[in-house]
Image (cartoon, rainbow, N blue to C red):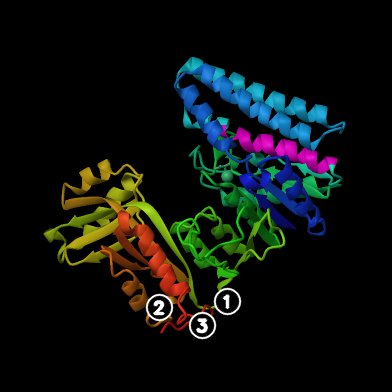
Amino acid sequence: MIVMKFGGTSVADSEAIARTISIIGGRLDRKPIVVVSALSKVTDLLYKIADSASEGDRKAADEYIETLQSRHITLAEELLEGNPMLEEARTKVADICSELKNFVGAVCALGELTDRSKARIISRGEWLSSTVICYAMNSRGIITNFIDARKMIITSDNHMKGEPDKAEIMKRVPEAVSAAFSGADAVITQGFISSTVKGEPTVLGRGGSDYSASLIGMAVDAESIEIWTDVDGVRTADPRIVPCTKNISRISFEEAAEMAHFGAKVLHPMTIEPAVMKNIPVYVLNSMNPGGEGTAILHSDKIEDGVKSVSYKENILLMNIFSTRMINVSGFLQRVFAAFSEHKVSVDLISTSEANISLTMDGNQDIDAVVGELSKFADVDVDRDKAQISVIGKNIVNLRGLLKQTMSSLKDCNVYMISQGASFVNISFVVDRSSMKDAVREVHRYLFENKDYESGDQRIR
Ligand code: ASP
Ligand code: MG
């Protein structure tokens, strides 16, 4: 069995879906479990519907739902033109939208939107896309059965970002999948959406369909997990910033996880973990260019040492915690981290010196409560206009000269913090946000566009 996940742009319209179905058609001998996202931009639209509902603006919500419905009806009409299944597909879409409309009406009347209701609203995108695509696959001769992801992807009751219950998922997915495969060439299910054991709606967080795919792959011991997107695999840097990026043909699970965590927007950061558990290769492929090379994410044994990418996080904040009481006092760090844990603020990089701890974190988090707590026993200084650049690659500690190269490419900007991950897979630097783009370009130029550095040759001279 293989898992094939198609993101929003791979199912954006009838043309994209037709292409996607022909890619699936070429893999039927490997028993594909197809996982789909909502059509591109649909989840954003559903967020607007939820916002309007929470503001009690029923008129706006209804208009958005109208847009949602007509987009999916048009899609069904284009994909199923002249097919007897069209009527059924049209009715299903209309039913899903009218149920949504009733639900949103009730939320408006109540004047309150809980996370649970919000999860229910935004999960409709994947439900609609998988419904229409299932009909389209069947109409093209691929016998496809539909699986309700909410019956198998079980999470905690954090409705907007459910924590997967792996034991429950391992039990439920194989059962649901094997039942659905009886008499079928393929099965289709929704990414992103899930539920609690009690059946309350939850979602896995933005971009969570990748995570769904890898959880399913883990549960069925898939031969491989394919993440189909709109770019030719993972690149050495963000091509929107750096002009001469290269495709990376293979990276390790650890490198991919660090890249996702440290800013590369190719995969949902949690995607790698379930694949690692079962050592399942993950391929990132382009549905607009199915013959392209893509990127294979494999066990580290199969990967060469060396720098693979330069990624960045644009909006981070740097916090300096200073206390003379820290010197020779045990338990200080514990107190600091207890404050972060209590207020659910997550930290990226940490570096400590005698009387000072520097930490970075996502700039969008609300840190007031943490700062209040820390200020009871230390001086806290928060600097918001910072960005973080990470150089990622297997065993980069062994690359003599890497730091020199990187630092000399950063010669024109201030570096506020340097952190080398304990895993030896990443070295990160904190710079001013205003100099971030130039710095990323410079570092990339030194490491990847420099004649002295041959990719595949680990030495940097
Ligand atoms: N549709 C969801 C989102 O846009 C999940 C996904 O696409 O992975 O966040
Ligand atoms: Mg998406």
Q: Which numbered disc, 3 or 1, marks the residue that appears first in the sequence?
A: 1
Left or right of residue 297: residue 112: left
In the rendered structure, find residue 43 and report the number of the disc placed on it: none
Residue identifier under label 1: 301
Left or right of residue 399: residue 187: right
Q: Is residue 426 visible?
A: no
Task: Give the residue displayed 86% in from the left and 47% down from the top.
Answer: 183
Q: Residues within 10 Å of mark 3 (few under 14, many from 20)?
A: few
| Tag 1: amino acid | Asp
**Alpha-carbon span between mark 3 and mark 1:** 17 Å
Residue at the outermost top position:
109
Q: Which numbered disc, 2 or 3, marks the residue that appears first in the sequence?
A: 2
Q: Residues within 10 Å of mark 2 (few under 14, many from 20)?
A: some
| Tag 3: amino acid | Asp
In the rendered structure, find residue 457 and report the number of the disc placed on it: 3
The span picked out in magenta is 122-139
Relative depth, front residue between 405 and 367: 405
* Residue 364 horizontal/vertical position (percent): 36, 44
Task: Give the residue displayed 16% in from the left and 61% down from the top.
Answer: 326
* Residue 406 horizontal/vertical position (percent): 36, 73
Residue identifier under label 2: 397
The reply to whether the magenta stretch includes residue 129 is: yes
Helix, strand or loop at mark 3: loop
> Above or below — where is 116 with respect to 415?
above
Ligand 1 within 8 angstroms of badge 2 C-beta: no
